[in-house]
Amino acid sequence: QKEVEQDPGPLSVPEGAIVSLNCTYSNSAFQYFMWYRQYSRKGPELLMYTYSSGNKEDGRFTAQVDKSSKYISLFIRDSQPSDSATYLCAMNGDTGRRALTFGSGTRLQVQP
Amino acid sequence: EPEVTQTPSHQVTQMGQEVILRCVPISNHLYFYWYRQILGQKVEFLVSFYNNEISEKSEIFDDQFSVERPDGSNFTLKIRSTKLEDSAMYFCASSETMDRESPGELFFGEGSRLTVL
């Protein structure tokens, strides 16, 4: 079983749609959960992070973590064509290790 | 806005040659990282660097790899004898802290694409 699994997509939605992106993981030591956005030929850019379980909202973006199910989600409301990118989940543990374990990324295309 | 800069943007080399990838982290950041992304695959951690020494490295970061902070601004990744499978995008990243408040707030550069022939 892969440590972090993420549906690669591509996911195509119309402008204004609500987008749901998800990752599952197997390592119960993971405590910090992040979502990065990566535009083509660019480096990953941090969107949101959460610690342990719960929800976090930032503008049109909401991150959810369910540690009991080892499942994390990113919701994008009122999606825009500029949201078209690859979305990477990433996580690490609470043991002092700083290395992030990334998912493979989901490619999102928002159609105008 | 401060950013991490990487050079070169693309390097083509012959198998067995040495390659040095360069990075200028954000100036007040203390932690530095190299990640790589083979085409079509996930971003993978290579090494982290703090206080002029390696703080953590992955299994990928074997004896062929080394990192250095030769001066107050540059952070380099050297691959001593490149192999075909080293072809990838190499990302440098830096962070100000690594505490509970912002454990994953890494700022990535745009990457250096390495092609080994």
Image (tube, rainbow, N blue to C red):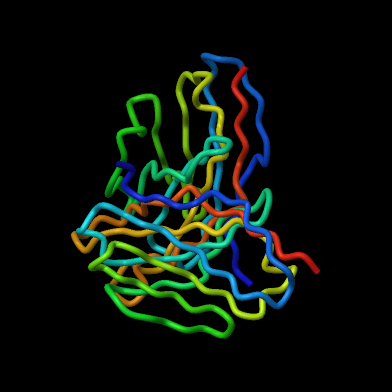
Q: Which image quadrant: the C terminus of chain B?
A: top right
Depth check: A91 or B106 in front? A91
The structure residue drawn at horizontal position 32% and vertical position 55%, both measured from the top left corner, is A25
Depth check: B96 or A75 in front? A75
**Left or right of residue A13: residue B40:** left
**Left or right of residue B96: residue A106:** right
Q: Which image quadrant: the N terminus of chain B?
A: bottom right
Image coords of residue A100 (percent x, y):
36, 54
Image coords of residue B65 (percent x, y):
40, 30
The structure residue drawn at horizontal position 39% and vertical position 45%, both measured from the top left corner, is B45
Using the rendered view, name the quadrant where residue A43 is placed.
Answer: bottom right
Depth check: A5 or B108 in front? A5
**Left or right of residue A49: residue B110:** right
Image coords of residue B52 (percent x, y):
33, 50
Count the numbered circles shown.
0
Depth check: B76 or A71 in front? A71
**Left or right of residue B15: residue A52:** left
Residue farthest toward the right in the current orientation of the protein:
A112
- Is residue A6 placed above or below B44 in the rendered structure? below
Image coords of residue B60 (percent x, y):
36, 33
- Is residue A86 placed above or below A111 in the rendered structure? above
The structure residue drawn at horizontal position 52% and vertical position 22%, both measured from the top left corner, is B18
The structure residue drawn at horizontal position 31% and vertical position 67%, both measured from the top left corner, is A32
- Is residue B114 placed above or below B92 in the rendered structure? above
